[in-house]
Amino acid sequence: MRVLPTDIDIAMHVNNGMYFSLMDLGRFDLMVRAGIWQKMRRRGWSPVAAGETIAFRKSLQLWQQYTIESKIIGLDSKAIYFEQRMVVDGEIYARAHIATRLVDKGRPVSQEEILAEFGEPPADLELPEWIHEWRENNALPGARKAAPHFWH
């Protein structure tokens, strides 16, 4: 890909929020290439991000070429986890971890339904331990629970 004028902020590099939007494209590309997208849409399922974290090393500059690398790193009872990287000439510029869910008419699709549709993941696909801690510490209450907006 190439950094476009619509990707940058006043500092003339990719806006920090834009990284997640660009990484969305990488996840969709992975799902289409793997044949998952068509199966999901046939079932009426849509992917949503449930949590994201990103770290930056270097800034992507206007017109710079880069690659988005995306892979599934595992799943648990509530989410499918991706690692994504922005890479220039073999060097990582940014890396993100994204927890995703599939939803059907606004309700989460169970992992049992997902596994029934797509099969069991590879046996060696094991989430890093820190992902569990990150998800627990980063997650907001579910949509049916209260989430008061006052500061502590």
Image (tube, rainbow, N blue to C red):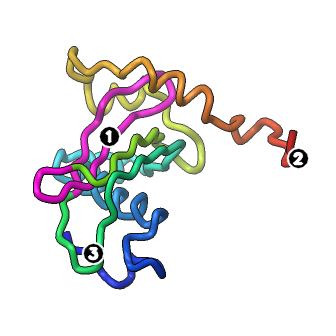
Q: Residue at x 38, y 45 (%)?
A: 96
What amino acid does circle 1 point to? Glu
Q: Secondary structure at mark 3?
A: loop
The answer to whether any part of residue 89 appears in the image is yes
Residue that protrudes farthest toward the left in the picture: 89
Residue 70 placement (x, y as % from top left) = 25, 46
Q: Pointer 1: what residue?
A: 83
Nearest-to-viewer mark from 3 and 1? 3
Q: From which residue to which does the magenta span run? A: 68-91
Looking at the image, tell me whether mark 2 or mark 1 is earlier in sequence order: 1
Q: Pointer 3: what residue?
A: 3
Report the front residue among 56 and 150: 56
Q: Main secondary structure of the magenta part?
A: strand
Residue that protrudes farthest toward the top in the picture: 123
Residue 151 placement (x, y as % from top left) = 86, 45
* Residue 87 within the segment the image draws in magenta: yes
Q: Pointer 2: what residue?
A: 150
Image height of 116 relative to 58, above or below: above
Measured Cα–Cα span from mark 3 to mark 1: 21 Å
Measured Cα–Cα span from mark 2 to mark 3: 38 Å
- Report which quarter residue 86 is drawn in: bottom left
Q: Residue at x 62, y 35 (%)?
A: 139
Looking at the image, tell me whether mark 3 or mark 1 is earlier in sequence order: 3
What amino acid does circle 2 point to? Phe
Q: Which quadrant is the C terminus positioned in?
A: top right
